[in-house]
Amino acid sequence: MFSRVEKMKINANFPELEKLIQKMGASKTQWTTGLKSKQLDLSKLFTIEGLDVEFEELTFDENDFIFKKGQQVLLFIKDQWITADEVRRDPLGGKSYKFHIVGHCKTLEQMRNNGRFDRYTVTANQNGKFSIFARESKHSSKKIKLVTKLSVCLNCLIKLNYKGSGYSRNGINSEARLAKKNFNIKEFFNEYSESLIHRPKYDDFSYPDPNYNPDFRTTSRKLKEAWKYRCSRCNVSLNQMNHRKLLHCHHRDGNPGNNSEVNLEILCIACHAEEGFHLIRPKHMRKQYEECLKIKKDQNIKV
């Protein structure tokens, strides 16, 4: 992980000590700590090998993109549990681990909760290839190294609403599956990610009025109809007329004046509360929250 080693010299002057040395007739000695500072070889970030990381070493921007030392990166698991033959046969399939483009998707949250995040490696390489370890055979514990493609995490795409990725009545929608199938890392970095990272979102003239505007009610209704009154996050159905009040239109950036569709997310009150628990502090909202939890249980949706 570390390549170049440098000695660090510290210069310090102590005038009173100098006078004492002279008074004593003693001679000065040169002293070094013997410690060495280590400089991280960030060039590894741009290789298929990548760098092993701990969660605390990473930073995340407002879009939840992942950064290491100011460089945007992807996360992947280097040590795969399946065999090398399985990886070669189906590198984009369901058995191999996926790479991640955001830092707090459902998969990564689960890995962190299970104390397994230290398995991850970061890379800024965009050629779509990853250097991993896999078992030599089904009944062998020996690991061999190979270079392979990996598939993007569906939960990451859904969190970003990437190219319409989300949920439908039957679960994950067709837009998400198509986006996963056609995902290109270089395209994502160049056209989607970097445009959001490096360009200011608003200027003095374009910043939306931070108040609900008259269009919001209409836009909200249309989006709820498009989602067939289902939560885009947990997929609970709130289509009954007396349940529709439990479905909200959430502003991702927290600005109620920004009603662009990419900034709006259709959420049940229970999922909306995850964005800010203050939402359900009023008594009537708390009752709606509890009602929504009951409906989710009735529909066998985890709460």
Image (cartoon, helix red, strand yellow):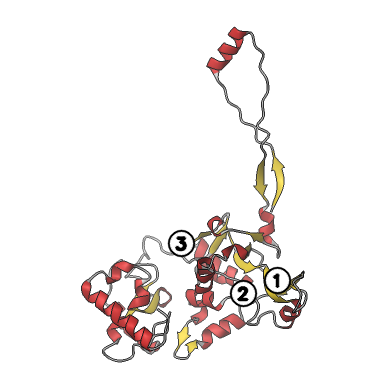
Answer above or below: position of 69 versus 5: below
Give the mark toward the camera: 3 or 1.
Answer: 1
The dot on residue 200 is: 3
Q: Which is more toward the observer, 200 or 229?
A: 229
Task: Name which residue lies at 29% across and 70% down.
Answer: 279
Helix, strand or loop at mark 2: loop
Q: Is residue 221 left or right of residue 203?
A: left
**How far apart in space, not on screen, are marks 1 and 2 (Cα)?**
12 Å
Q: Which residue is mark 1?
A: 129
Give the mark toward the camera: 3 or 2.
Answer: 2
Q: Is there any visible trace of residue 141 in the rendered image?
A: yes
Q: Amino acid at mark 2?
A: Lys
Q: Which residue is mark 2?
A: 98
Q: Earlier in the sequence, mark 3 or mark 1?
A: 1
Q: Residues within 10 Å of mark 2 (few under 14, many from 20)?
A: many
Q: Earlier in the sequence, mark 3 or mark 2?
A: 2
Q: In the rendered image, which quarter contains the N terminus?
A: bottom right
Which x, y percent locates residue 124?
64, 63
Helix, strand or loop at mark 3: loop
Q: Residues within 10 Å of mark 3 (few under 14, many from 20)?
A: few
